[in-house]
Amino acid sequence: MEIAYPICPKNEVYGVTVSVRVIRDEKGAMKNLWEGEGAISGEVKRGVFTVGVPDSFRREKKPLAEVLPKGFYVGVEEVTLGGRLDSGRDDWVDLSVRPPRALKAGEYQTSKGEIVSREWVNDQLGCWRRA
């Protein structure tokens, strides 16, 4: 599952956590399914990576031990311009939503089923208009 994460031009993706919410004693908690850190390529640093595949990151902190569920959260840790690690945004990925056609190179699907470009993804952040 390839992800296009929106990131400001001066920041880089450092690590990714894939998680699901679980109910324990009437309280919600997060269970991590997969974690990677240390983006390997420029493409990964700019926000395009594959969930559950260790090739995107130098270290797989938690290997994917099961098939991804139909829905999960993807959280990203970013490196800022000053070199500080910062929690980025997280978002819900819904695998039950299928695209109406095969995606072309450079196309991505939102959890609502819209087919969008990488530029559209980045445009979700105001920083791209100021860059």
Image: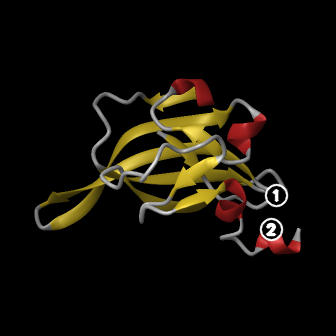
Please tell me which residue lies in front, 77 or 129: 129
Please tell me which residue lies in front, 108 or 129: 108
Position of 39 relative to 106 (above/below): above
**Residue 59, how many percent across, how many down?**
57, 27
Q: Residue drawn 51% across and 28% down?
A: 60
Other-residue count near label 1 (Cα within 10 Å), few / some / many at <14 / 14–19 / ≥20: some
Render colour scheme: secondary structure
The residue under label 2 is: 128
Q: Residue drawn 59% across and 36% down?
A: 37
The residue under label 1 is: 9
- Residue 16, located in which quarter of the rendered image? top right
Please tell me which residue lies in front, 98 or 111: 98
**Residue 46, how many percent across, how many down?**
73, 47
Check if mark 1's residue and mark 2's residue have beta carbons within 8 Å: yes
Please tell me which residue lies in front, 113 or 55: 113
Dot 2 falls on a residue whose secondary structure is helix
Q: Is residue 94 visible?
A: yes
> Sequence order check: which comes first, mark 1 or mark 2?
1
